[in-house]
Amino acid sequence: MATLVSPDHVSYDDDAQALKKAIGGYCIHKSLSSVLRQARTLCPLFFFCIIPPILFFFTYLSAIALILRILGWGTDEKAIVSVLGHRTAAQRKQIKQAFWDRYQEDLIKRLESELTGDFEKAVYRWMLDADDRDAVLANVAMRKSLDYHVIVEFSSVYSADELLNVRKAYHARYKKSLEEDLATNASGNARKLLVGLATAYRYEGTEINAALAKKEADILHDAVKDSESHGEEFIRIVTTRSKTQLLATFNAYRQLYGNSITKALQTDPADEFKTLLRTAIRGLTEPYKYYEKILRNAIQKRGTDEDALTRVIVTRAEKDLKHIKEEYYKRNSVSLSQAVAKETSGDYKSFLLALLGDEK
């Protein structure tokens, strides 16, 4: 995970000033305003005869500066990576507040306006509070591409309280519930599964009912063969049972029928319901392997999938990225940092490597 700075060694006001310097903020017109007011009062002739050409000259310089900033020449991206890539969520929150207190500006909005491309997207999502970030990811997934896998991902991987907090953040940001949007956009068994996963509040104990696991393995076997008739039973089991109980059920399925339930669900890749079920099952039972595969596919895809790459690294950097990195190396015999460095470039690459704790 990212190499983060101890809270005892962080000056949030210093960080705010460093970021202000990095993203700019010097305005020629503002710096001249007080001088011009005094000139008009003390010497009207000087003001009306001399000042207009000077103003034209400075306006010209401002336009050039604006063009350079649009081209990215006015922002110190390395300083942004150096500061933000090594701060915890709590520290970033303090930095945002310090930036507002000192400059009366929203740091996230300012970063959005100054940065571009994948680097901007990664920094923006890193600066959001975790729950708010997931709410944004969920909304983007539905609004832009109807990619429900992102929502299934956090609905199955997160704890009951984490998931509840995401739903609260979604409600606060978009003034409607996550399940309302899911119900509006999805249909059929996929809709029932998505709403059930997003609203689940699972028991998180370690108890297992072996008899129930065997019984529900049989039910799932029937549901795999005929998802139209038995889909609701599949949804009931996957959206209500504890993760420990589900793992026992899926193990019983393998013992009884000779293969994993995820392989059994591969029969029809075009079946959205079964595809979402596979994502949910893998997220519920093997989150590290799930994330490793997402990263592997993102990196090996023809034309790197930067959205998936950014999502996993940013959302897991302060949680379990260490374990995901270990899983990636075990599966691919190359470190995740090496793979990221090979397939990305520029400030985006530097920022991801900072979050991975492996910047050079």
Image: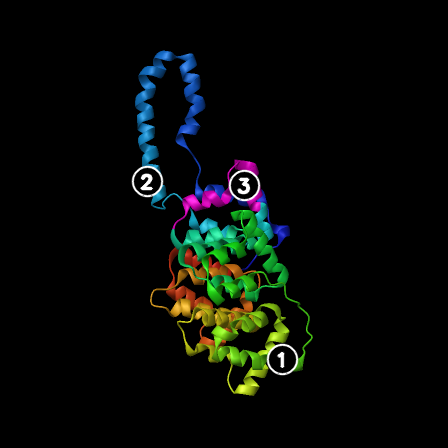
> Which residue has dot 1 on it?
213
Q: Sequence order check: which comes first, mark 1 or mark 3?
A: 3
Magenta-drawn segment: 95-116
* Viewer-closest of 135 and 230: 230
Screen quadrant of the C terminus: bottom left
Mark 1–mark 3 Cα distance, whole angstroms, equals: 53 Å
Q: Which mark is residue 268?
A: none
Residue 224, horizontal then vertical, whole percent: 49, 78
Mark 1–mark 2 Cα distance, whole angstroms, equals: 64 Å
Q: Sequence order check: which comes first, mark 1 or mark 2?
A: 2
Q: Sequence order check: which comes first, mark 2 or mark 3?
A: 2
Element type at marker 2?
Answer: helix
> Which quadrant would residue 272 be assigned to in this image?
bottom left
Mark 2–mark 3 Cα distance, whole angstroms, equals: 25 Å
> Which residue has dot 3 on it?
99
Q: Residue at x 32, y 21 (%)?
A: 52
Element type at marker 1?
Answer: helix
Identify the coloring. Answer: rainbow
**From this viewpoint, is residue 132 visible?**
yes
Q: Looking at numbered disc 1 in the image, what kind of residue is underneath it?
A: Ala
> Which residue has dot 2 on it?
67
